[in-house]
Amino acid sequence: MAVPKAGAAEIGDPGSPSAIDVHGFVSQGYIKSTSNNYLVDSTGGGSFEFSEAGLNFTVQPLDRLSIGVQLFAYNLGTSGNFTMRADWFYLDYHLRDWLGIRAGRVKLVYGLYNDISDIDAARTPILLPSSIYPLTNRNLLFGVQGGEVYGYVRIGRAGALEYRAMGGAIDIPLPSQIGQSAEASNIDIPYLAAGRLMWETPLEGLRLGVSGVALRLNEDLFFPADSATESARDTLYSYVASIEYVAHDLQLAAEYAQARSEVRELAPTPMPIPTVVSSGGYALATYRVARWFQPGAYFSFTYANRNLGAQSDTPVNNMLTTNDENVQDDLAGTLRFDINSFWIVKLEGHYMHGTEALGAVPTEDQKSCLFLIKTTGYF
Amino acid sequence: MSTSRAKATLLILVLVFTAAIGTRAASGADGFRIIVSPDNPVGSLDRRFLTDVYLKKTTRWASDEAIRPVDLGPGSPVRRAFSDDVLRRSVSAIKSYWQQMVFSGRGVPPPELDNDGQVVRFVLKNRGAIGYVSDGADVAGAKIVPVR
């Protein structure tokens, strides 16, 4: 059987340091839900408002220096609206394998997969587990403007260590709505620090890691019903413990995250808001049965307030009021079909219980199902 | 979901899995040899070093020369054998790894060449290059390096 061939477009002599590597992708999805339109209005006939496209260029003009940029646009319901922006851009000086320095806009390192959460072709599920990688927070996933140091060190029979540490700020596009009753006039992350340490164990394919992020979040909110404005200055600390095993065609992964959110300042009406500790995690398995077929499944759970569990009706930050709004369980199954080396089609189903990870939308049912189809072309 | 629709879905899934397993069983694998520039002083290579080189985690020879790995195309049986034996992952899994790296801005994969002859020419032309070719390929002066 003839296999269609596609790969990076290389401008210049293939493999030569001066060649420009060009890669791109375009995705179109369809979403159908039984209720709780948290991504897009997808009950009834479903929705096609689920699109992504990206194009990147990488060049290595000098022996240890590389330059790259990726343009990215997406549309998901009312967000994105195909506005093109630089997903990442950088100058990278790779001094040694154990020390590289990068400046520009870099993808936030968090867990195993945060930096590929926009890239459908790079994973099996259409939606990554929302307990760690909520799609409704995708503006936070855009790049950190700042710098990063990184490296990879073999440590003999003990395996290898890979580290990344970064600092900077995140420019967040304004959402039109915050919660069910507020509009944002300003949201930004003026500074953050993040890092990840991965240990590649002596058992080949098994790696363990921990990553963390600390950030300041400034929000200026307008409440139309009261014609009132409030400003909040929050701090957020979060960590993720990760384990992944990849061997031949098998991939197993599990992660657990905990986040601590503190409101440091609230104006003009200071009120006591308790510190909230949220948590979540998932376990995922995929297996490539054939070159063209890879099924996968995961179970993901989330607690908005870890101390409440599912047993209390206590509000969280005056927003969550019932047991089921404090939790969410998500059982997902995916079938990935690699039609050829530049085209994939995925089918995915979710059964969800609880509504915590659904974001700031009116919720209707505590149990819901979500069905997605997505196709991606890439080179 | 009605019982008949559930049965139809189950039947389709069984057929898909059966077809997938069938095509997997049909896959074969060929032998390969690792080649480097004749100017390269390396005598043999550790398999895990080779893995790091092809995943671009290790980018320098001991002499500090930049390592320039080169691949065969994804449909090549020699590529499949190299991927299974050295990288311990399928070609598809390696492609997935590079998709993650490429689109997150972490790196670009080794160039893919069409045949053994192109790999040999690339290795002879570039002092830091490393490649693999089929067992019977004419290496035309390139240095064959055993894998430990």
Image: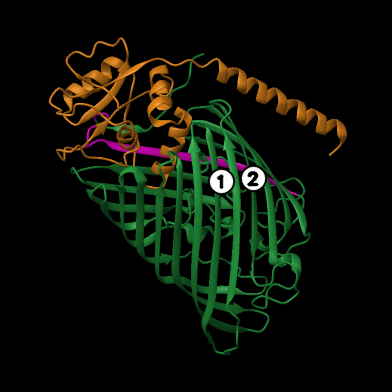
Q: Which mark is residue A48?
A: 2
Chain B shade in the render: orange
> Could you tell me residue A364's position as x and y percent?
78, 61
The chain coloured green is: A
**How many other residues sit within 10 Å of disc 1, few (<14), some (14-19) or many (≥20)?**
many
Q: Residue at x 56, y 20 (%)?
A: B24
Q: Which mark is residue A51?
A: 1
Q: Which residues are magenta?
A: A13-33
> Could you tell me residue A39's position as x and y percent?
64, 55
> In the picture provided, is B98 more to the left or to the right than A300?
left
Above or below, A28 relative to B23: below
Q: Quadrant of residue A157?
A: top left
The residue furthest front is A157
The count of marks equals 2
Proximity of marks 2 and 1: CB atoms separated by less than 8 Å:
yes
Is residue A135 visible to the viewer in this orientation of the structure?
Answer: yes
Disc 2 residue type (three-letter): Phe
The chain containing the residue under callout 2 comes to A
Report if residue B91 lies within the magenta region: no
> In the picture provided, is A238 more to the left or to the right than B39?
right
| Badge 2 and badge 1 both on one subunit | yes
